[in-house]
Amino acid sequence: MDMQPQSKNPNFIQQISSIMPHFCDKCGAKHDQGDLEFVFNDTAKAMCKLSCKNCGNMYMIHINSPMDGMLSAKRSSFKSEISAKEMNKFSGSPRIESDEILDVFNALKGIKNIEDFNKHF
């Protein structure tokens, strides 16, 4: 796994690895541990990104552990214009705060054309 998760329950992490799909649904290439990256991890739930190194296909896997020793997982397709390489470039970046988003939104309100945009940036 690329990003080592922090969890109070190490069995939960081992169980996630064991339920990971073994082959890509799109091209059939074999997945390995490096294809799975934790996006979010808590004591009883996690969200992982599974990407195929061969074709670039990506899935998000939502995992819940309602009881010790029991897992439920739901896989959903991840369609984006952002490539896996671009996504990985920013995956370790610090979290963006709500105030930062609001500042950008407010700064962009007054932009009416490309000249206005170029003045700001």
Image (cartoon, grey):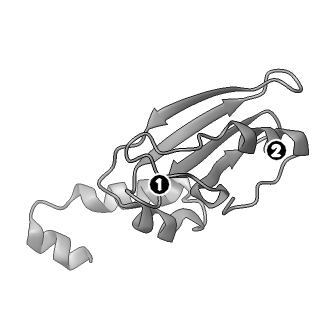
Q: Which residue is mark 1?
A: 52
Residue placed most toward the observer, 97 or 38? 38
Q: Whole-percent x and y of residue 19? A: 69, 36
Q: Secondary structure at mark 2?
A: helix
Relative to 94, is 120 above or below?
below
Is residue 9 visible in the rendered image? The answer is no
- On the image, numbered disc 2 is attached to which residue? 14
Looking at the rendering, which quadrant does residue 14 occupy? top right
From the viewer's perspective, is 79 left or right of 6? Answer: left
Q: Amino acid at mark 1?
A: Cys
In this rendering, would 56 be left or right of 11?
left
Q: Secondary structure at mark 1?
A: loop
Which of the labelled discs sits on residue 87, or is there none?
none
Residue 60: x and y, percent?
52, 41
The quadrant in which the N terminus is found is bottom right
At x 67%, y 32%, the residue is 63
Counting from the top left corner in percent of width and height, residue 44 is at 79, 33
Residue 68 placement (x, y as % from top left): 89, 26
